Amino acid sequence: MNELTHIVSTRRCLLRNATPSDYEALATAIGTSEFPSELPLAGLHRQGRLKAWLSSMIETSARGRACLLSVDLRTGEKCVGQVSLVQKGESGSWNLAFWLHPSHWGGGLALESARAAVQHAFTAMTVEEVWAGAAPWNLRSIKTLLELGLKPIEDGEVSADQSESEKAFRAFSLLRDHWVHSQRER
């Protein structure tokens, strides 16, 4: 078996490019009763499209339009979660998303791995803005985004053709210049 190349290391995590072999861990995590059924990955799982999503994200990453990182623990546990950055059109704005197996919630791993991905985005990639969205009920994700330094974006106009789930969405943003400035203040 080939050794996986880790892109980013943290105190407890090793982030590496996702592979098709991560599917089982992804499906297992999303299939737990604790994983919120309202989240997009859970919907893909119910529709039988989760494996296709993973393949598409891996292909998009290979083309440089995304960066899907699987989170391995230094203890040896593989793919306990993932962090993704996906380019928005042709812009320097990239969408941040993350998930963890529910057995790892509450221990700060989401913050640790997402922080490492944001740092990678602003230092090793050409990302100018990281933005993310969270449902208003997803307080843990909102807390993580705020701790990462992302700031809430004011609610904009809601079009009549948006679904209720699209309307119930809070957006957050962090500009590279603000991130660099915050790093200097540390």
Image (tube, rainbow, N blue to C red):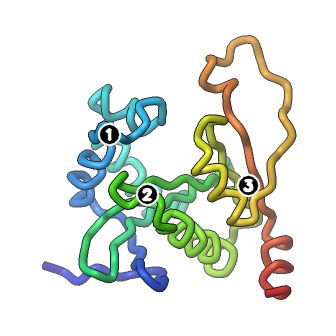
Q: Which residue is mark 1?
A: 50
- Tell me which label, 1 or 3, sits earlier in the chain: 1
- Pick whichever, 16 or 146, lies toward us: 146
Q: Which residue is mark 3?
A: 91
Residue drawn at x 21%, y 60% is: 21
Is 33 drawn above or below residue 116 in the view shown?
above
Give residue 85's position: percent from left, percent from top. Answer: 56, 59
Give residue 58's position: percent from left, percent from top. Answer: 38, 57
Circles 2 and 1 in contact, beta carbons < 8 Å: no
Quarter-wise, where is residue 155 in the image? top right
* Residue type indicated by callout 1: Leu
Q: What's the CA distance linking mark 2 and mark 1?
A: 21 Å
Residue drawn at x 69%, y 24% is: 167
- Pick whichever, 136 or 129, lies toward us: 136
Circles 1 and 3 in contact, beta carbons < 8 Å: no
Task: Please state if 70 lies on the left or on the right of 64 as rendered.
Answer: left
